[in-house]
Image: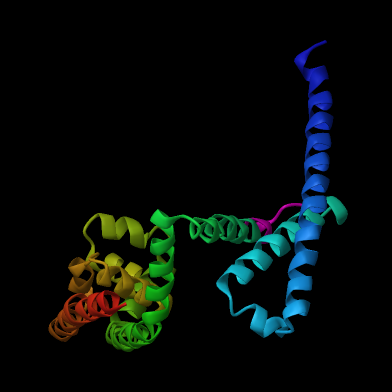
Amino acid sequence: LSLHDALPIFEHISYLSQFVWSWLLVFNTIPLVVNELLQMIAQNIGLLGYCKSIWNVLDITTYGGLLLLIAQKMLFGIPYSKITYIIAALVAIAIWMRLLYYFRGFKSTGILVKTVIQITLDIRFFLVILLVFIVGFGVAFYLLVQIDIREYSSTIGTHQDVDPAEDCENGESFGCLFLNFGDPVRTGLSLFNAMLGGYDLVALDGSSIWALSMTIYIIYIIAQTIIMLNLLIAIMGDS
């Protein structure tokens, strides 16, 4: 029996093992889903009340995601796609985060889990203010560099061999400017990265309004890394 002849046998074995494990997972998950539904009915809290607990949200995300993945492949025969891996990624996060629920039962880790939850609740309004800073300065930067971005974008359109990433790597300031502030999403991510210490002052060298852009950037860095960071430390210390 050659390897070529044995390949179909291995494929059938692999499919059979996937089939068996999938149905075992279904039979294990359905009772858990039913238990969650009975819990919601018994407490008479409704879906919104049920979702107020982060642990319930993690449970329903895990069970619902697993059933969706199994139904997609085994019941409907839909091939794996990008949405499959997105659901799988969310389920993976939910499964591992559910471990924190069981860590609460131990003295050494229970206090840490409680502290993490309390700090998360306490900084919710801080996150709103942080978002205001990022959006406000992000809009300012996006507007300031529009003239340069449009000029560089037209260059990319007329020269197909122009690569912003390669230009930035070679020290071309317009390429870095495009990568950091080329659209609203890039701008927001760049400012968020700057808040964490990832400053890219070279990108602003491509701005025709360099003095004003650099001044606003420095004000943003001071506001985020000094004022907001110390505010966050004070909130966490008070928790």
Image point (18%, 72%), residue name: 205
Q: List the single residue furthest toward the right.
A: 75
Query: Which of the image's four quarters has the N terminus?
Result: top right
The percent position of residue 136, horizontal first and vertical second, equals: 32, 89
Whether residue 182 is visible to the viewer of this picture, yes or no, is no
Which residue occupies the foreground of this view, 71 or 211?
Answer: 71
Which residue occupies the foreground of this view, 140 or 123?
Answer: 123
**60 is higher (above) or lower (below) than 167:** below
Q: Quadrant of residue 111?
A: bottom left
Number of numbered discs: 0
**24 is higher (above) or lower (below) than 126:** above
Query: What is the magenta range?
Result: 79-85
The percent position of residue 207, horizontal first and vertical second, equals: 22, 78
Image point (81%, 19%), residue name: 6
Q: List the single residue furthest toward the front.
A: 107
110 lies left or right of 81: left
Residue 106 is one of the magenta-drawn residues: no
Query: Which of the image's four quarters has the C terminus?
Result: bottom left
Whether residue 94 is visible to the viewer of this picture, yes or no, is yes
79 lies left or right of 147: right
Which residue occupies the foreground of this view, 97 or 193?
Answer: 97
Q: Quadrant of residue 59?
A: bottom right
